[in-house]
Image (cartoon, rainbow, N blue to C red):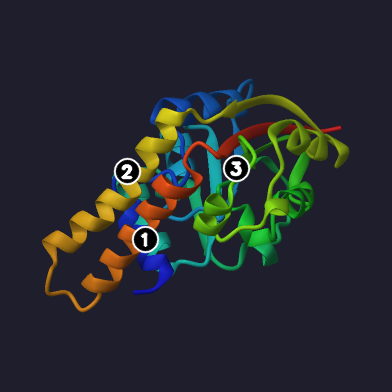
Amino acid sequence: MDRQQISRLAHAHHPIAAPLADESVARLLDRATAGREEGRALDLGCGEGAWLLRALAARPGWQAVGVDLDARALTLARETATALGVERRIGLHHQDATEFTAKEPFDLVLCVGSTHAFGGLLPTLAAARELLSPSGRLLVGDAFWQREPSQAALDGLGAAREDYADLATTTDRVMAEGWTPVSGYVSTEHEWDDYEFAWTGTLAEWVLDHPDHPDAAAAREAADRHRTEWLHGYRGTLGFVTYLLRRD
């Protein structure tokens, strides 16, 4: 079973692929689109389009574009858009987000939990700058060290200490790149736990419901490994911050 399929299954009950509750997502979108009855939004690494579809359903004057490498996820996004009646206001591109270009800039660019596609937070900021209007806003979410990581945490994440910094240093680095945080949100421990239990539990339940599927053993191994890496490794160590940024 490939990673994209595992991710789709694991996010079935938590379509926002980040440790953010529905209420947090709604508040972030409200703040990101504040003052604009009409606008254009772009999600780099949109998956099944959860952010964009929520934005469009609540904002009839907005249009959106999503970019992702997972063709099946984009198909599901189109189906959901049709069910919500917003299919004419969204364009979905099966493309590497790092290669996406646009003729017109966007009022809002999103990249929450997908900065790995660009090689990290700072390269994501650089890519977003090229796609954002001068007065536009960037909603970007990435991890940080909530406390000094143990070796178990690093092993669980398959990460190195230098892959992330603490919140203060991360914010300083963002500002040094010419961005001003106009709002932000740090995910709570409850949101992290809810996200991780949803990820591992949904995947494990799929295995229980499909025991004879040829990929059942691989899916079960992925769920069990992820749960162990989280509970015995990075729980309480890895934080997640979502910034709302404007260009200086």
Q: Given this view, does label 1 or label 2 mark the residue nearer the observer? A: 1
Label 3, secondary structure: give it.
strand
- Position of the N terminus, as image quadrant, is bottom left
Amino acid on which the number 3 mark rests in the picture: Ala
- Indicate the position of residue 154 as horizontal and vertical percent values: 58, 54
List the residue tagged with mark 1.
Answer: 225
133, 242: nearer the viewer: 242
Q: What is the CA distance from the residue labelled 1 to the residue labelled 2?
A: 13 Å
180, 241: nearer the viewer: 241
58, 22: nearer the viewer: 22
- Position of the C terminus, as image quadrant, is top right
Q: Earlier in the sequence, mark 3 or mark 1?
A: 3
Vertical order, 230 against 207 (above or below): above
Q: Earlier in the sequence, mark 3 or mark 2?
A: 3
List the residue tagged with mark 3.
Answer: 41
Label pair 3/1, CB-CB below 8 angstroms = no
Amino acid on which the number 1 mark rests in the picture: Arg
Q: Residues within 10 Å of mark 2 (few under 14, many from 20)?
A: some
Vertical order, 215 against 101 (above or below): below
217, 139: nearer the viewer: 217
| Residue shown at the point (45%, 47%) measured from the top left | 17
List the residue tagged with mark 2.
Answer: 197
Label pair 1/2, CB-CB below 8 angstroms = no
